[in-house]
Image (spheres, helix red, strand yellow):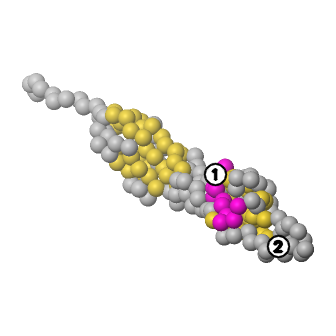
Amino acid sequence: LVTVATTLSAGVLSGSQSICVDGSALFASTVQGGRWSSGNTGVAVVDSVTGVLTGVSPGSTNITYTVYGLGGCPDASQTRNVTVTAPPIPGVLSGPSALCSGAAAGFSSSVIGGTWSSTNPSVATVNASSGVVNAVSAGLVLIRYTVSGSGGCPDSSASITLTVDQSASAGVLSGVQS
């Protein structure tokens, strides 16, 4: 009696090929029973059974799914390349913590390429690209700087709390001028 084993297949792989450092993704195959492995665990690790992938550091690595052969048949493998991206950093923000209504000031970040916004434009507005803030009326507002994420990483932001004070007024003078 001779038993002939069929040729193995590792199936079709699925799962995000771009993740963020400390982010995760689920890899899957159309064939069950195999094991997952990472070509570079310094970049990404993968749970050998569940296929949950976690980004470790920026870089690129191959994730391999292997179905082990039986009865003299060779193993079957499929590989998928994954890129791990560092999360964006909004940098160190600078700008005043207080302004008088009607005043303007420039805000800046140590990182270029982000976008400025105000959480309350009725208190202070900000030019999205230049970071110039115009104080409108008394109150508190967050001036936020957001850097767009890429490669599976979400946007990241930092903010400065700005207090806008009502401008002082000397009032109207009256009396006899001699």
Is 67 one of the magenta-colored residues?
Answer: no
Q: Position of residue 126 (x, y in %)?
A: 38, 50
Residue that label 2 marks: 5
Q: Residue at x 44, y 49 (%)?
A: 106
Return the residue nearer the eye: 169 or 173. Answer: 169
Quadrant assignment for the N terminus: bottom right
Q: How many marks?
A: 2
Q: Please rate how many residues cluster around mark 2, counting C-alpha atoms within 10 Å: few if below 14, some from 14 to 19, many from 20.
A: few
Q: Residue under label 1, please give it.
A: 23
Q: What is the magenta range?
A: 18-32
Pointer 1 local density, CA inside 10 Å: few below 14, some 14–19, many at least 20: some
Residue sitting at x 37%, y 35%:
140
For residue 34, what is the image quadrant?
bottom right
Residue at 88% from the left image edge and 68% from the top image edge: 71
Q: Is residue 23 left or right of residue 127?
A: right
The label shown at residue 106 is: none
Q: Quadrant of residue 10?
A: bottom right
Report helix, strand or loop for mark 2: loop
Q: Position of residue 99 (x, y in %)?
A: 38, 38
Mark 2 or mark 1, earlier in chain = 2
Looking at the image, which residue sits at the far top? 175
Split into 4 quadrants, where in the image is the C terminus?
Answer: top left
